[in-house]
Image (tube, rainbow, N blue to C red):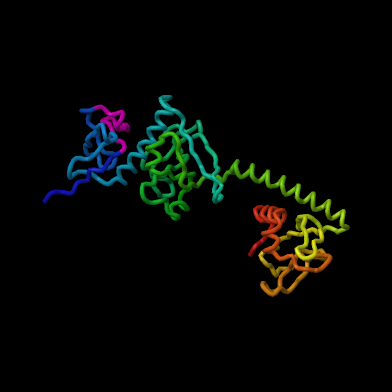
Amino acid sequence: MDLPSRSFAIPVAFTSEGRIVRPDQAEPGQAYRCPGCSTKVVLRQGELRRAHFAHRQGEGCSPESAAHRAAKRQVVQVILDWKDRDGPRPCIARFCPRYGCGGGITQDIPDDITHAAEEVRLPDGSVGDVVLFRGDLAAAAIEIRATHRVSEEKARRLTIPWVELDAAEVLERPYWWTVVQDGLQPFRCPVCAKAEAERADEVKAIQSRAMALAERIHTALPPSPPYHFAPHTCWRCGTEMVAFVWPGSGNHSRRRPPDPIPGQIQHRMTDSMGDYWANCCPNCSAVQGDHYLRTENQDYTRVHASVELEGDVDLL
């Protein structure tokens, strides 16, 4: 029976010295081996198809094992070349953990990293795909993802800093390590920091306008914090007023506001949402509903959102 073909494209191969070579760097007639199973591979080139390595008919391993081992060797080779001054310093790119931010930071590998090795057993009993060393001491683990992410159990067990990289990304950009997940120190995202500073300035301006309004209409303001303010106009009678944000406000909360409670924050019953603490018009007593404030008053929305991000408002 003929064995099935395993002739998938292999992105890189090993030379006889164990170094990684790419298809466009390979020389026809030279011997190259698969990173995954160490069998000989064929260099295929043509006018219509991109150059690549492939197993012979009926031989070979899986794309995942080839990519996994090649990426491990690539990381070690990059560190070796960098320390020998034959290549650039690699860097780690980390994305902001906040959903939708799109920001992050880039960190160079520290100068005091001396070398790297594959498949190193660590003091906690786990085996690191690649381990970076400072002399004889393991400094960080580099885990390579071909199919499966680092498990929660292994992540908890690792006692040294670690990052997980995607195998295909490592082979595509050897010196730019984009982190899939990590066990490094938390960082402050510069994009978020800039947005927070701009938001703080905007909220400060809104609250300044609210305080000026309060002085003009002779409304006493409670301590800030815990209260925050926004200018508002009553939906029923058009009276100018100050709307308040406080810990637990919004979302039709029944939690009692902090003392001293301003007179226009009242515990009221509504047909649609039942009873909750709400901003009320000081002139006509109409409830300025949470939904109305959040959708019709952009100043109030910005103040409330800013307070939520700062953790000032408990929504539970």
- When the figure is inspected, residue 112 is found, relative to residue 258, above or below; the finding is above
Residue sitting nearer the eye, 299 or 121: 299
Q: Can you say whether 299 is above or below 249 in the image?
A: above
> Which residues fall within the magenta stretch?
11-27
Residue at image position (70%, 47%) is 200
Q: Which image quarter holds the C terminus?
A: bottom right
At 19% from the left and 43% from the top, the residue drawn is 59
Q: Position of residue 53 (x, y in %)?
A: 26, 36
- Image coordinates for residue 48, horizontal then vertical, percent: 26, 34
| Residue 173: quadrant of the picture | top left
Q: Main secondary structure of the magenta part?
A: loop
Image point 77% across, 68% down: which residue? 286
Is the residue 222 above or below the residue 287 in the image?
A: above
Quarter of the image holding residue 165? top left
In this rendering, position of residue 296 left or right of residue 151: right
User: Which residue extends farthest top?
Assistant: 85
